[in-house]
Amino acid sequence: MSRFERIRGRLRRAYESGRESVRAGRQTPSDVPESAAVASPSSPGPAAPAAATVVGAEPTAPVHNSTSSRDDADVPHALRIAAAWCWRLIVIGILFWALLKLVGTISIVIIPLAVALLLSALLAPAVGWLLRARLPRSLATAVVLVTGLAAVIGTLTLVVNEFIKGVPELTAKSTQGLQQIQDWLKTGPLHLSDNDLDRYIEETQRWVDNNTERFTSGALSTAATLAEVLTGTVLVLFATFFFLRDGNIIWRFLVRLLPVAARWKVDDAGRAAWATLVAYVRATVLVAFIDAVGIGIFLVIFDIPFAFPLAALVFLGAFIPIVGATLSGGVAVLVALVDSGPVTALIILGVVIGVQQVEGHILQPLIMGRAVAIHPLAVIIGLAAGVVLAGITGALVAVPIIAVLNTAVRRLAARRVPDTPPDAVVVASRAP
């Protein structure tokens, strides 16, 4: 026999010996002979049969499938599950806190990118129309961006011009209104004297003098804020241009960074979330325009000054759901109170409330539909969290973020296979 055959035989015998030892280890107590049974500690005599009960011996505690040791088995199952949830939630909370700190540190970059995404969702349909008209992608993007920028600049110019033109008249009427308030304080139920009014005016002047340094420091910090606003505006323009032109390429690059098994599902959820964002922005713009036109018509009818600037303010405020248009409409009510008296102000207040009711019960469900349907409680919580974290910008982007996350999570949790992309290449193996 050759040396190779001898080695092969040794390996075979070792393998058979290992199998026999494994079989012996798996042998059940019923297969063990009576002669090999272990005697009870209490009686050193013959071993008790397998079915016998040994008096005084402690029963073995059952070990749950979720435990890894006897110590875990002594802890109640509910407590072990609660502890497992707790440490996982603590880890998630720490990661979320770190993410918020990172976003707060680079907010000068994150906020312009978020605004650019909203503008891209608003202008993307217009770019699509120009692309279907056979315009090059770069030219179509530039045309849409320049047109939108011109519309914004033109609207701001009209608002500023009308505001400058109406300030002197409103200032005079404000002076008259203040005089009427002073007369009412004297002759009304408060019956304040001239000395009381003078004392209150002096206290107000003293408070202003004591806080002049705070106001000055705020004005000095405004210069830095203005620089940040200009930087953010430039970043918004550049980011919007490239999002509109190369958004699909950027998204595919990000998807390719994921594992192959998750790419199609993430791509499907991302595209559904983008469709939701586009629908939300378009619907919000339409609703805001209707609110501004409805309130602006009544401002013109009652000859309220700054009708166009107030309508523009209502339009911008409508981008903050539930509370935005109401607060901006309150400014219109105050202007009507100063200019035309309490009766006209009450009428404008009724118009603002009526427009809000039409928006909340008719326009929002009809225009936005089920694609971006969010519970009002989620909207309120999102707005509060956005205001606390990022102020006005947080209030603007809170609800779109909730809508996008709602769609993306629902699509990721759905147990279905996404549609095959039209440009996918399927490689099939030959049949055996």
Image (tube, rainbow, N blue to C red):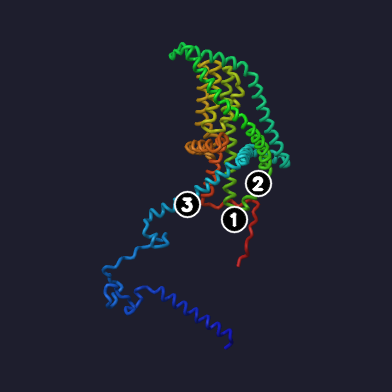
Residue 285, x across and y down, in percent: 59, 33
Residue 116, x across and y down, in percent: 63, 39
Query: SS class of the residue under badge 1?
Result: loop
**Nearer to me, 176 or 363:** 176
For the residues labelled 3 and 2, the Cα–Cα distance comes to: 35 Å
402 in relation to 327, above or below: below
Query: SS class of the residue under badge 2?
Result: helix
**Nearer to me, 249 or 386:** 386
Q: Which residue is mark 1?
A: 259
Q: Which mark is in front, 3 or 1?
A: 3
Total marks drawn? 3
Image position of 119 (left or right of 88): right
Kindly identify the amino acid type of the residue bearing the numbered disc 3.
Arg
Residue 345, x across and y down, in percent: 52, 19
**Nearer to me, 370 or 395:** 395
Q: Quadrant of residue 61?
A: bottom left
Q: Which residue is mark 2?
A: 248
Query: Between disc 3 and disc 1, whose residue precedes?
Result: 3
Kindly identify the amino acid type of the residue bearing the numbered disc 1.
Pro
Quadrant, the C terminus: bottom right
Q: Which mark is residue 88?
A: 3
For the residues labelled 2 and 1, the Cα–Cα distance comes to: 19 Å
Kindly identify the amino acid type of the residue bearing the numbered disc 2.
Asn
Query: Between disc 2 and disc 1, whose residue precedes?
Result: 2
Q: Which mark is in front, 2 or 1?
A: 1
338 in relation to 420, above or below: above
Q: Quadrant of residue 398?
A: top right
Q: Which mark is in front, 3 or 2?
A: 3
Task: Report crowding for label 3: few under 14, some 14 to 19, many 20 or more residues within 10 A (C-alpha).
Answer: few
